[in-house]
């Protein structure tokens, strides 16, 4: 049996462009996947984090700079 919510979603998405449907599919798959937070850091990542922890306050960077640095370095 189809729920009223599912019928409403189908009606809304019926005329949606393919790129929007692909984005929505990715969103739905992400919601339905079990959240997996178990991961291991590489030795290089551990070393990098340790170096950051040991910095003096003056050496710390803005969060945007840090995130960009980590993103480019570790492709996250």
Image (cartoon, helix red, strand yellow):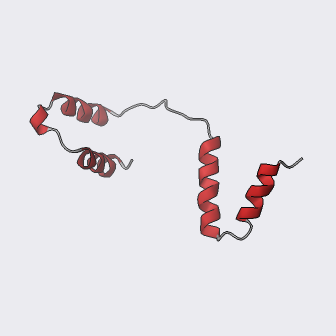
**Residue 10 percent across, percent down from the top left:** 76, 60
**Residue 40 percent across, percent down from the top left:** 42, 31
Q: Is residue 62 left or right of residue 45?
A: left
Q: Nearer the viewer, residue 10 or 42?
A: 10
At x 31% / y 52%, what residue is drawn? 72
Does residue 23 sit above or below 51 in this rendering?
A: below
Total labels: the figure holds 0
Q: Which image quarter: residue 7? A: bottom right
**Residue 13 percent across, percent down from the top left:** 71, 63
**Residue 4 percent across, percent down from the top left:** 82, 50
Q: Nearer the viewer, residue 12 or 32?
A: 12
Taking the view exactly as shown, the residue that stands out farthest to the right is 1
Does residue 27 sit above or below 50 in this rendering?
A: below
At x 33% / y 49%, what residue is drawn? 71
At x 25% / y 45%, what residue is drawn? 66
At x 73% / y 57%, what residue is drawn? 9
Does residue 36 sit above or below 10 in this rendering?
A: above
Q: Is residue 24 left or right of residue 66?
A: right
Q: Which image quarter: residue 8? A: bottom right
């Amino acid at each position: 049996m189809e729920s009223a919510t599912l019928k409403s979603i189908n009606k809304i998405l019926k005329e949606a462009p393919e790129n929007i449907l692909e984005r929505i599919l990715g969103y739905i798959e992400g919601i339905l996947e079990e959240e997996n937070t178990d991961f291991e850091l590489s030795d290089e990542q551990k070393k990098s984090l340790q170096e950051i922890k040991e910095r003096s306050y003056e050496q710390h960077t803005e969060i945007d700079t840090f995130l960009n640095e980590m993103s480019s370095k570790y492709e996250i």
